[in-house]
Image: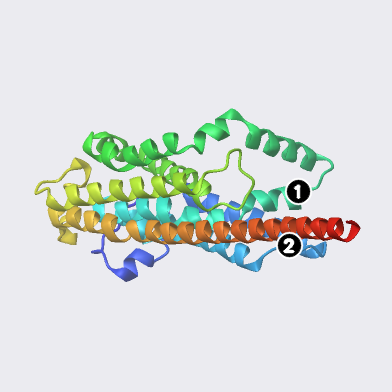
């Protein structure tokens, strides 16, 4: 694993600097390429596809490249605050952008129904209807994963053991991205899902995740000794105090991690109100039509008599 020699700075964080095996940047490029190919195919066929969705998905892929393919990745190997920033980006920022791109809908619309595309569609439909997909997107499964990703991972000592190896470090980043997608999909996705999530369930999940971030941030800020031993020895040239760096990680969990959840909370409430307003208008229109029909019936009876 490559660790930078210069002290951390904004310029160094954003400087292109790939690790020897850039797994996640490659995944980001592949996802962007496949998505663009699907969108271009629809446009070439004269079929509509949202530019806003496309921009959202490609922005998520671009952030994935920056977070795991720039200098941030190198500093995240030795600084707890940078690693937590990467974790929050992979769990809270990038997944909503990918999900809002509606990649599932694009897959169903752009994949040919003949040849290999037929097999791809069958696999996609089977996965969508599977029991595993229903379980994976259920809050009872997702919330414990989020809890372990913060509290359990760091307070149990598992983080130090995993981060000591390249495979463990990359595995954690991939796991963070996967958990973020599982968490964001039921909350924000417009794609067809194996089970719809009620608005009450969405609010409950967001509320629990906000409490997890708050508890994790509070522990990191108030603890006066390094919680994760792996980050206790930053290079001397960086002049990093591990305890202050740990407090910065906690502050990020409270601010950078909570803001996306607050936005999701506001959007969920707005969608809930809009749905109820539309339903109320439809119900009122149906009741008015039924009343008009009944009055007309009474008028006809009066005319006959």
Residue 179 screen position, x and y as percent: 44, 43
Q: Residue at x 65, y 34 (%)?
A: 129
Q: Which quarter of the figure has residue 170?
A: top left
Q: Which residue extends farthest right?
A: 304
Vertical side of 143 occupied by 223: above or below: below
Looking at marks 2 and 1 on the same chain, the residue that comes earlier in the sequence is marked by 2
Q: Is residue 164 left or right of residue 31?
A: left
Which of the two residues, 287 or 18, is positioned nearer the viewer here? Answer: 287
Residue 239 visible? The answer is yes
Q: Which residue is mark 2?
A: 40
Residue 258 screen position, x and y as percent: 33, 57
Residue 64 visible? The answer is no
Which of the two residues, 112 or 192, is positioned nearer the viewer here? Answer: 192
Vertical side of 179 occupied by 25: above or below: below
Q: Residue at x 39, y 45 (%)?
A: 204
Residue 284 screen position, x and y as percent: 64, 59
Q: Which residue extends farthest top?
A: 131
In which quadrant is the C terminus drawn?
bottom right
Which of the two residues, 277 or 10, is positioned nearer the viewer here? Answer: 277
Residue 65 circle label? none
Which of the two residues, 155 or 235, is positioned nearer the viewer here? Answer: 155
**What is the count of numbered marks?**
2
**Helix, strand or loop at mark 2:** helix
Q: Which residue is mark 1?
A: 111
**Helix, strand or loop at mark 1:** loop
Residue 247 screen position, x and y as percent: 17, 55
Q: How many residues crowd around disc 2 within 10 Å: few (fewer than 14), some, or many (20 or more)? A: some
């Amino acid at each position: 694993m490559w660790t930078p020699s210069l002290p951390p700075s904004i310029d160094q964080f954003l400087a292109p600097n790939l690790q020897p095996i850039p797994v996640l940047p490659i995944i980001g490029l592949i996802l962007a390429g496949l998505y663009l190919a699907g969108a271009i195919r629809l446009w070439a066929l004269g079929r509509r596809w949202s530019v806003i969705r496309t921009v959202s998905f490609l922005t998520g892929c671009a952030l994935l490249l920056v977070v795991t393919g720039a200098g941030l990745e190198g500093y995240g190997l030795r600084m707890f605050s940078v690693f937590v920033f990467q974790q929050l980006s992979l769990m809270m920022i990038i997944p909503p952008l990918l999900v809002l791109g509606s990649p599932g809908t694009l897959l169903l619309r752009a994949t040919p129904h003949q040849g290999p595309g037929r097999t791809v569609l069958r696999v996609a439909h089977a996965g969508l209807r599977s029991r595993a997909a229903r379980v994976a997107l259920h809050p009872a499964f997702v919330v414990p994963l989020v809890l372990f990703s913060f509290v359990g991972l760091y307070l149990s000592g598992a983080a130090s053991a995993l981060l000591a190896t390249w495979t463990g470090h990359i595995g954690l980043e991939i796991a963070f991205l996967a958990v973020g997608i599982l968490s964001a999909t039921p909350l924000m996705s417009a794609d067809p899902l194996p089970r719809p999530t009620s608005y009450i369930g969405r609010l409950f999940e967001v509320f629990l995740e906000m409490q997890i971030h708050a508890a994790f941030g509070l522990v990191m800020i108030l603890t006066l000794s390094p919680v994760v031993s792996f980050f206790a020895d930053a290079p001397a040239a960086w002049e990093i105090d591990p305890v202050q760096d740990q407090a910065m990680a906690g502050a990020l969990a409270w601010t950078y991690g909570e803001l996306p959840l607050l936005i999701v909370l506001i959007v969920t409430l707005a969608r809930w109100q809009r749905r109820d307003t539309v339903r109320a208008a439809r119900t009122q229109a149906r009741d008015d039509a039924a009343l008009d029909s009944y009055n007309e019936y009474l008028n006809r009876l009066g005319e006959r008599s």
